[in-house]
Amino acid sequence: DVKVTQSSRYLVKRTGEKVFLECVQDMDHENMFWYRQDPGLGLRLIYFSYDVKMKEKGDIPEGYSVSREKKERFSLILESASTNQTSMYLCASVPGGMEAFFGQGTRLTVV
Amino acid sequence: GENVEQHPSTLSVQEGDSAVIKCTYSDSASNYFPWYKQELGKGPQLIIDIRSNVGEKKDQRIAVTLNKTAKHFSLHITETQPEDSAVYFCAAGSNYQLIWGAGTKLIIKP
């Protein structure tokens, strides 16, 4: 079975903290994505990666960065967390067929 | 920019009735149209998809139709059951990149 694992289900962080969200896939997929999900807005793409050390900005990259040092791991970094980054974060891994496999999501609250 | 509009945002149907969710896309280069179901506390999961060379696809109680000329596609669920209650997302795209609809919360009334 395909598996995408996000390191935390729930996180509470303080404004200004540096936050790391980790995502690991066990399927040897090249493509990995980070989305944020907000009510009424669907899934919005933050960053994606086609390969190790490769990254591309999505639609809403401001305030975020990413790291992909190994094929199976794609990390999302909030350099200085702000309250408007309170959201559900979803990681997805995509093989050649375009079906996206999602992790269970991380609900981040910034206080 | 490119976008996908999804309607309705909430849909409440009686158990056993049919449910239809509609999406319209703007990018004429889109050639892949998946539908995802997201249950509470979980990530979205693919339930059915269609490619632009096909007009309709069916899998048991679920079907998707695509009208490329009008740039819209729809999800049809027949004989709805309580376990169909979830949020459904449509998406449209190509080359691994998808634009997502805002989601439809489907409520199945007993």
Image (cartoon, helix red, strand yellow):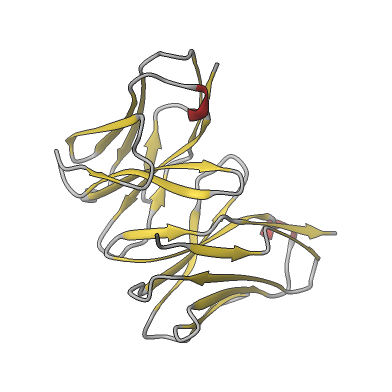
Q: Is residue B22 above or below residue A57?
A: below
Q: Quadrant of residue B2?
A: bottom left
Seen in the image, is A94 located left or right of residue B19? left
The answer to which of A83 and B31 lies nearer the viewer is A83
Residue B17 in the image: state x and y as whole percent.
78, 73
Which image quadrant: the C terminus of chain A? Answer: top right
Q: Picture coordinates of residue A70 (x, y %)?
A: 17, 35
Q: Residue furthest right?
A: B110
Q: Provide residue B80's location: percent of width, then percent of height.
A: 73, 68
Picture quadrant where residue B94 is located: bottom left
In the shown orientation, is residue A85 left or right of residue A46?
A: right
Q: From the viewer's perspective, is B93 left or right of B19?
A: left
- Residue found 38% across the figure and 51% down from its top: A1
> Compared with residue A29, is residue A53 higher up or lower down, i.e. above or below?
above
Count of numbered badges drawn on the protein: 0
At a point 25% along the width and 35% down the height, the residue shown is A73
Could you say which is closer to the camera, residue A75 or residue A18? Answer: A18
Q: Is residue A108 visible?
A: no
Q: Can you give x and y, in whole percent of width and height, for residue B103 in the image? A: 59, 56
